[in-house]
Image: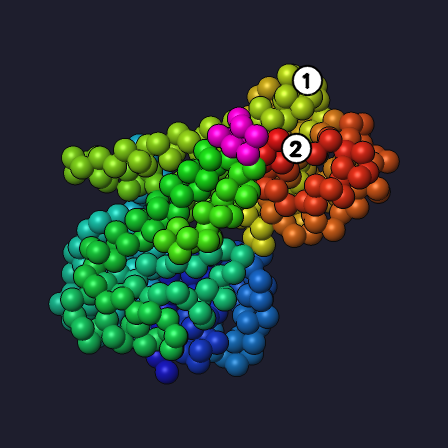
Amino acid sequence: MAKIAIIGTGYVGLSSAVGFAHLGHDVVGIDIDKAKIAKLSSGQSPIFEKDIEVFLKKSLKKKKIAFTSDYSKVAGSQFVFLCLPTPQLDNGAADVSFILESTKMLSRHLKKSSTVVIKSTVPVNTWKLVKENINRDDVAVVSNPEFLREGTALQDFFKPDRIVVGCTDEVKATEVAKLYKAKKAKVVFTDNTSAEIIKYASNSFLAIKLSFVNEIAAYAESTDANALDVLNAMGLDKRIGKDFLKPGPGWGGMCFPKDVSALKESAQERNVPIPMLDAALESNLKAQLRVVKKISDALGGSLKSKNVCVWGLAFKANTDDTRFSPSISVINLLLKQGAIVKAFDPVVKHVPHLKIDVTSEIIQSVENADVIVVLTEWQEFKSIKPEIIEKWVKNKIVVDSRNLLDKSKWEKNGFRFIGNGYN
Ligand SMILES: NC(=O)c1ccc[n+]([C@@H]2O[C@H](COP(=O)([O-])OP(=O)(O)OC[C@H]3O[C@@H](n4cnc5c(N)ncnc54)[C@H](O)[C@@H]3O)[C@@H](O)[C@H]2O)c1
């Protein structure tokens, strides 16, 4: 079993820390956020993520995991994983300052011949800057990008599709790969720079795919076709694949928008622009605007003083993460056009800087609503009974941007039902 330090205990760091501890490694999680450290040390998860608190409590009990803000505690660890934020700068590029500051602090505490593993999503050649900052010949730097999805983070940690390990030192690369004990996962050994690009290229490809899907949905709506049939049939082609073929209110979250922008900036800086990324970003904004237009059209062309009930604030189901959530973007567009928005989300009860009423009960959200809008694909919404809802709303209209609800059930109860990708 290895001794592992995880720097940054956010969505990626905490999932990895808890995952490695469950596999039997001795883990120390280090974060500058002292309140987070106190919470984690008492067995409480600061994030909503399936099973994470159960696994956290178990590992704390077995003394397999500990949390601190003290960087000197990395001294006992053979492997130090960087799970730090790389947010978007104003110019679209990735901000690697968290990585650089942290590695400067880290260097003097690192154990002899230890390995620093970059798990954060970082632009090309960040590994070289990390190496420079650490400035120690005995310490290896391995690029090991993370692919977990919020909502299924632990499942993805234990059963990843692939593990990418970028480092030209084969021994160090193999040691890192072995930590995961993931027998079925395909391990891709490569150089550091390729590993860095694999992450950006993967996320950008998925974002482009979703943008295309939303454009096909818009196009199908302008005809008599049903985009859901079109996309379903497309997905039967193995070359296309059935995943990521659902129309929605645009893509978002903490990864896709910033990763697409960062790759775009990096490519432009190198004089090899990737225009498809510009198109995907523009198309994504159009997808959000299209949802707003659907709502406005359903209400006769104006949103002014209309009561819009929104279901779903998280950027996807099964997470509490609202960072760059398309729901929030759509809500802001609705507010701009004068709508009064009330929202319900099974997990999110507050969104910083968003001045709307977030209700604790679903019924409160629909009271006096002119329209109900589904923006996040929480499965809970499927079981909501239109026959109960109808008593509370002003207008019986549903705009389902995720095609989540059972259209016929709502129509049977007299609701006008507007889906995404068909008329
Ligand atoms: N969230 C995801 O789904 C996901 C998936 C794959 C990859 N990634 C990438 O992983 C990285 C981390 O993302 P995240 O969503 O976990 O971020 P996050 O914001 O949830 O967590 C980052 C943590 O780092 C801590 N931190 C900041 N500066 C620090 C420092 N100097 N020392 C110690 N701790 C510090 C913060 O307090 C926070 O707890 C990013 O590069 C992201 O792009 C994220």
Q: Residue at x 40, y 56 (%)?
A: 238
The reply, left or right, for residue 323 in relation to residue 85 is: right
Q: Amino acid at mark 1?
A: Gly
Disc assigned to residue 233: none
Q: Where's residue 40, x and y in %? A: 53, 64
Q: Quadrant of the N terminus?
A: bottom left
- Magenta region: which residues? 218-225
Which residue carries the number 1 mark?
Answer: 300
Q: Nearer the viewer, residue 74 or 200?
A: 200
Q: Residue at x 46, y 35 (%)?
A: 216
Q: Is residue 315 visible?
A: no
Q: Is residue 370 visible?
A: yes
Q: Where's residue 126, x and y in %? A: 22, 51
Q: Quadrant of residue 359?
A: top right
Task: Report the coloring of the rendering.
Answer: rainbow
Q: Where's residue 198, x and y in %? A: 28, 54
Q: Residue furthest left?
A: 137
Around disc 1, counting alpha carbons within 10 Å, would you say few (fewer than 14), some (14 to 19), or many (20 or more)?
A: few
The response on whether ligand 1 sits within 8 Å of label 2 is: no
First in sequence: mark 2 or mark 1? Answer: 1
The reply, left or right, for residue 212 in relation to residue 167 is: right
Residue 40 colored in magenta in the image: no
Q: Secondary structure at mark 2?
A: strand
Instruction: Indicate whether 103 appears above or below 349.
Output: below
Q: Nearer the viewer, residue 94 or 50?
A: 50
Q: Where's residue 247, x and y in %? A: 52, 40
Which residue carries the number 2 mark?
Answer: 418
Q: Secondary structure at mark 1?
A: loop
Foreground mark, 2 or 1, reads 2
Q: Amino acid at mark 2?
A: Ile
Instruction: Indicate whether 107 appears above or below 390.
Output: below
Instruction: Indicate whether 185 appears above or below 102.
Output: below
